[in-house]
Structures are given as C-alpha cells and as structure tokens.
Image (cartoon, rainbow, N blue to C red):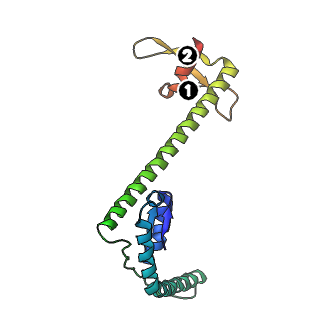
Amino acid sequence: MLALVPDAFTQMRVGGALRQYGLGEFTLPLGMLAGGVPELMVAAALRHAAVASDARRTELLEALRAERAYLLAQILGSGKCTAPAPFPASEQTPALPEPLGATVRAARDLFTETSLTAGFEWAMSDRAHSWDAEHRRQLERARAIGGGYSAHGIHGAHGAEQMRPVTVDADSESPAETHPARQGLLAKVARRLRG
C-alpha cells in the first residue's frame, strides 16, 4: 500500500491509520510522483503485506473487541471491568533504504509544514477579507443613516479636534459612536470620503 497525499491534513489522517499497521512510512506527497521512489515504496509495501498484515490486522481487531466490550460494560453499568490493554505498538516498516528514506522523510516533513503554513495563510486572508467586508457594510449603513460623522468632535493628544465616525450595530437601527481606541481603517475611509 502507498498513500498519495495532497495536503498536510490528509498526511496526518492517512499516516496515522497506516502507523497502526506498521506502514506509517508509506505516504508520499503528490509532488514526488516523478522518479522511481513510488515504485520502490510499492515493492517494499508488497513484501511487507505478504508477511505481516494479516497478523497485525488480527491483533488490532482483538484489541478493538476488548475496547468495545469494556466501553459497553461501562455504559451499561454491568459491574467493574478491568480496562483493556492499550493498543499494541507496531514496529514501523521502512519504506525505502537509507539515505533515500531520510530524504523522503525530510521532503514529507517540509511538505507538511508548507501545507500547514499555506492553510494558515489562507485562513488569515479569508478572515481579513471578512473583516474588511463587515467594516465596509457598517460604513455604508452609517453613511445612509446619518452622513457618517457625529456632530461633536473629541480632542486628540495634540489638542486638535478629531471627528469620530458613526457606526451602527447589526441589531440596532440607531447610530452609536465607536470607542476612540477602535478608530482605524473605518475612520480613515470616512475622512477620505468626506474630502
């Protein structure tokens, strides 16, 4: 068995499942399909499968049955049961000879880190776009209700009067002044629109 993984999430899930059978090294990022690495890994997996997979599967099924019986006894309250032994650890089968195995592990780690970073950056970008859209909606609503500015100003640190933009809460129809510490992008946009 060889698992081709497109991202870090898949790498973690599939790699974890394969580790239960001693095949945690048999995951390969899609970008590494070129070359002879996949063929070497498939050959090693087939050699391993012929020897150990059925025995390991039987061992894991027995551990799962014991865990299920224990949980069922706990739920039904049928007396004291001894907790089952933890899942038996499995010796991991090397997928490739060294130093090629170390190179693939390093590439897999770099792939996982890059994939997680890309996912995080996408999430942060999406959050920023949502935040900007909400501020634009509040600005447009405030402009439609009352022109966008409060009637009285406040004095800043240097004595100059600063105007506070009016914002409207989503569940309120009346304008409310924002806290001075929350002035930022919305105030700048409103000042530019005003002229």
Residue type beneath disc 1: Thr
In this rendering, the answer to whether 181 lies above or below 16 is above
Whether residue 40 sits left or right of residue 3 in the image: it is left
Location of mark 2 (residue): 192
Where does the image place residue 117, in percent across and percent down from the top left?
Answer: 43, 49
Local crowd size for mark 2, using a 10 Å CA cut-off: few (<14), some (14–19), many (≥20): few
Residue 114: mark: none
Residue type beneath disc 2: Arg
Is residue 24 something one can see in this rendering?
no
Q: Front-most of 92 and 100?
A: 100
Residue appearing at x 46%, y 82% in the figure: 49
Q: Front-most of 65 and 152?
A: 65
Whether residue 37 sits left or right of residue 6 in the image: it is left
Figure quadrant of residue 35: bottom left
In this rendering, the answer to whether 138 lies above or below 54 is above
Where does the image place residue 116, in percent across and percent down from the top left?
Answer: 45, 52
Q: Front-most of 117 and 184?
A: 117
Instruction: State the CA–CA distance, disc 2 to disc 1.
Output: 18 Å
Residue appearing at x 58%, y 38% in the figure: 130
The secondary element bearing badge 2 is classed as helix
Location of mark 1 (residue): 178
Please tell me which of labels 2 and 1 falls first in the chain.
Answer: 1
In this rendering, the answer to whether 188 lies above or below 135 is above
